[in-house]
Image: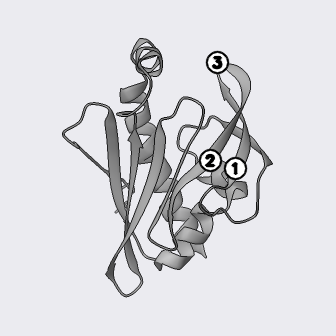
Amino acid sequence: MSESPIRSEIFETGNPYIKAARINIAASPSQIFAILSNPRRHKEIDGSETITANISGPEKLELGSKFGMKMHLGIDYRITNKVVEYKENEVIAWRHLGRWVWRYELKVISENLTQVTETFDGSNIPAISKVWLNVRKAYPWVQLAIAKTLVRLKKVSELN
């Protein structure tokens, strides 16, 4: 009998510009947060497979931290992100020049079981960014990338 694949749960937020998924991870919030707050580990969990390398930033992110990544999405480019929300072991979020936000929220379910919700929030971005995301048909793609990121985060977190 084969194991069923690990999946995250995609859910509707009620806002077409906010995409979200969640997953339960058999690890403590501090174990998971240590991965999320270390930009050098983001390539390891990136479900979009667009991060090619970490190029700048601290070992541990905090509110206001900036970190740079080499990316590839059709073309090679570099992006700098800034942490805009931070509550140790509970919430971390960052954004870049396009101003959309990637947010991770951690909620204790029971001892050594944490629910992680990731959202991509494009609701408060400049009109030109919304046009670009719509033309690129980014929202459905981002929805799947978020779901894949959470599966990778689960695998990495449960190995520690």
Q: Residue placed at 34% from the left, 56% from the top?
A: 22
> Regarding mark 1 in the picture, which secondary structure is present there?
strand
Q: Toward the viewer: 5 or 74?
A: 74
- From the image, which quarter does the C terminus lie in? bottom right
111 above or below 50?
below
Q: Which residue is mark 2?
A: 82
List x then y, in percent, for residue 157.
Answer: 54, 69
Residue 69 placement: quadrant? top right
**Position of residue 37 in the picture relative to residue 106 (left or right):** right
Q: Which residue is mark 3?
A: 74
Q: Residue placed at 39% from the left, 40% from the top?
A: 121
Q: Residue furthest top?
A: 135
Q: Disc 1 to disc 2, how far (Cα)?
A: 4 Å
Q: What amino acid does circle 3 point to?
A: Gly
Which label belongs to residue 66?
1
Dot 1 or dot 3: first in sequence order is: 1
Q: What amino acid does circle 2 point to?
A: Lys
**Position of residue 120 in the picture relative to residue 109 (left or right):** right
> Regarding mark 3 in the picture, which secondary structure is present there?
loop
Q: Toward the viewer: 61 or 73?
A: 61
